[in-house]
Amino acid sequence: MLRLDEVLPVLLSLILLGVDAGIAQQPPRAQVDGGVVEGSYYDARSADAVFKGIPFAAPPVGDLRWKPPASVPAWRGIRAAKEFPPICPQRLYSPEYYAGISARVGGRILPQRPLTTSEDCLYLSIWTSNFGSADRRPVMVWIHGGGNNGGWGTQGTDNGESLARQGVVLVMIEYRVGALGFIADSALTAESPHHSSGNYGLLDQIAALRWVQRNIAAFGGDPTRVTAFGQSSGALDVTCLMVSPLARGLFQRAISESGACTGPFAALKEPVTDHFAAEDSGRQLAKALGISGSTNVVAAMRSKSADEIVNVMSQNYGIAHEVNVDGWVIPEQPDKVLNEGRQLSVPLIVGSNADEFRTLAGSFPVASMAGYSEQLLGALGNSALLRAFVPRLLATYPASDTAEAQRRLFELNNDGFGSGARYVARVMAKARQPNVYFYYFTHVVPTPGGQALGAFHTGEIPFVFGSDMGWPKGPDDLSLRNAISSYWVQFAATGNPNRRGLPEWPKYEPASDRYLELGDTIRVGSKLRQRQYDLLDDAQSALDARLSH
């Protein structure tokens, strides 16, 4: 029997729709935080609805800049939700990234919708094929990548219609990025009731997930079956949310594509391994903005335009702006939480692509073979603490000349993605989470340019969403797309990706170390790059051991 709180949103949606034999079909409308929103239909059925640009928090402008997201102000009347919102302030390099991939693989350069940036950017968009229905479908909340420095919800995807048609309610969110989303500063810490600064982008993601809990039933979604999924920095953020007490209860499954919350991370007030204190970033930003001597530095920083801050950051790449251990959103080092099994225990899909780094770095200049070991240490992120690993590094990534050293250095950087994914799979399995699934994406665009790039970073996104990126397709592309999206949707529905008609995906167990290869042939493998991943795990453990001293 349906509860009253389950029925009311549906009744209200039906009333707002004007469902009556004698009334023409109106655009889809729903009651959400703040008021009524009106979307559009993306297909002939009245259940197929899309709502673009629904606010889930107040605009983080003026005094709300560098503060946790505030509640949505109410509006009168019906608010249109038919256009994508502006994206959060950033340097717009992301369109160049996808256009560059298409050019390199010999594909079509697809037209980009005009992009505008604004600090008023805390919006989400929803695709549903279950609008107006009394039943509830699983919900998937997409957290985009972009290094937590850029990106937007629909980046790398046409839209969410394909996943919605397969039986989920899809939500794509925007969140603050770059300095506006992740800068830490001592004055910001001092004014915070939580004695915290930075991680504003994570707080936006948490606010969006809370919005989903309160409102998604009006769109046919089930708030008890929410999957948080993301790629690259979005995947890192998903796994960071798994160690944040603020996110508990907000999602019941997680998917991490090419990113993981493995540290150590910077802390607010003291250096951590190779990281400066996170609050140093705010001091550097104030200096770059020319306001270091101001009586009220925070007020002076808030008086600067978003464009000024983005421009200054683009000229000062050394100013860090990333997830930090702030004592509130991320109370302690994520590795410590993961290793002790105290993270949110939810079913998890985690994995990486075979050639992640080919689209992230063009080359790795090595001055001479004499400097090769330093290059290897630099790729690990901390040359001082990991010097004892040099012999193992040279044995695992041997090189006899500069050209080979460049190839090996690429392998090491690339293995960082795969070893991070396996690390998270292992700690989840050790914490006795029974539904952990590890994958390795190997599909290559079938052109000479595609062969040169391999299975690159972001290459799996169109297979997840069923979107057309303009890349040339091979004979197995359609079946691989259908398989990957079906695995993802089935996982969102049940916490287990296996369903009839798909190759069996075994649960991850450290002893067997099995994974599913997602390529032109889908098959089970085991002990993926075991020697390399074990070395990187040991280096990770050596860094983590220093955190307890």
Image (tube, rainbow, N blue to C red):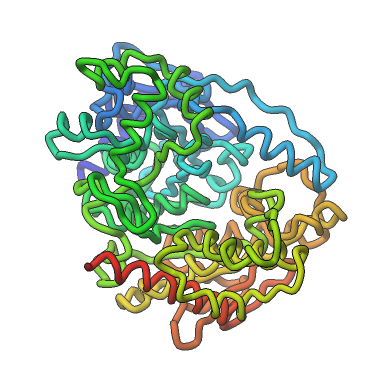
* Residue 265 lies in quadrant: bottom left
Left or right of 63 on screen, residue 402 = right
Q: Position of residue 219 (x, y in %)?
A: 39, 38
Residue at screen point 63% across, 63% down: 371
Q: Pick out the residue farthest to the left.
A: 193
Residue placed most toward the observer, 43 or 530 = 530
Q: Position of residue 512 (x, y in %)?
A: 50, 87
Residue placed most toward the observer, 11 or 540 = 540
* Residue 492 lies in quadrant: bottom left
Q: Position of residue 226 (x, y in %)?
A: 37, 52
Q: Pick out the residue farthest to the right.
A: 448
Q: Pick out the residue farthest to the bottom.
A: 511
Left or right of 410 on screen, residue 89 = left
Residue placed most toward the observer, 350 or 316 = 316
On screen, residue 426 above or below 16: below
Residue placed most toward the observer, 478 or 310 = 310
Residue at screen point 44% across, 59% down: 260
Residue at screen point 62% across, 41% down: 156
Asked whether residue 25 is in view, the answer is no
Q: Position of residue 262 (x, y in %)?
A: 40, 61
Residue at screen point 67% across, 61% down: 355
Left or right of 349 on screen, residue 519 = right
